[in-house]
Image: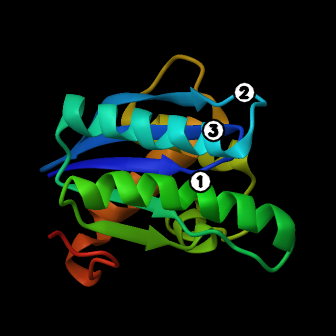
Amino acid sequence: MRVLGIDPGSRVTGFGVIEGGPGLEVISWGVIRLGGGPLPERLWKIFSRVTDLLMEFRPQAVVLEEVIPETFPRAALRLGQAQGAAILAAAQNGLPVYLYHPLEVKQALTGYGNASKEQTAYMVKYLLGIKERLPLDASDALSVAIYHLQNIKREEAWCSPK
């Protein structure tokens, strides 16, 4: 199964594509740099680029980190809007969408739910055999994709295909 993982952000959105089977194979990863333009333009970039990624890599599912509003409610609103742009692209393409809490993902990958982004990135690189520098936003996207592939039988789609 091929999965597109997304770490939504209002300035930088990370993505990672992983093929799951007997093992895990990283297909692609990177970041979508949104710049500092008006929010509607940045959301359009997320929607357009995620749509392009869906066409290029043909995943069977899209997975995202949940937006956690407790600490920074105003920032969570912007992140939720970025997340919504990615979810809309997936829904428009008839793909199931899964959301995972970041602490749950970190716990599974590192053994510690409050692991730093750097600790999570280290485990992602180790698990996928990535040698080059990995941006933290791309690492977060890959981590949620790994988690999904490890737990797919237990989860139900948040947004079912058309």
Of the 4 image quadrants, the one containing the C terminus is bottom left
Residue tagged 3: 42
Q: Are marks 1 and 3 in contact (CB under 8 Å)?
A: yes
- Between residue 70 and residue 139, name the one nearer to us: 70
Query: Quick one: label 1 or label 3, which is nearer the N terminus?
Result: 3
Graded by Cα atoms within 10 Å as few (under 14), some (14 to 19) or many (20 or more), the crowding at tag 3 reads many
Which of labels 1 and 3 is toward the front? Answer: 3
In the displayed image of the protein, which residue is found farthest to the top?
A: 132
Say what amino acid the circle numbered 3 marks. Arg
Q: Is residue 109 visible?
A: no
Snapshot quadrant of residue 63: bottom left
Image position, residue 30 (x, y; %): 49, 27
Q: Is residue 11 above or below residue 33?
A: below
Marker count (numbered)? 3
Image position, residue 68 (x, y; %): 70, 73
Q: CA distance from mark 3 to mark 2?
A: 7 Å
Residue beneath the point at 63% across and 38% down? 42
Snapshot quadrant of residue 54: top left
Residue beneath the point at 44% across and 43% down? 47
Residue beneath the point at 35% across and 28% down? 28
Residue tagged 2: 35
Q: CA distance from mark 1 to mark 3?
A: 8 Å
Image position, residue 23 (x, y; %): 20, 46
Residue tagged 1: 82
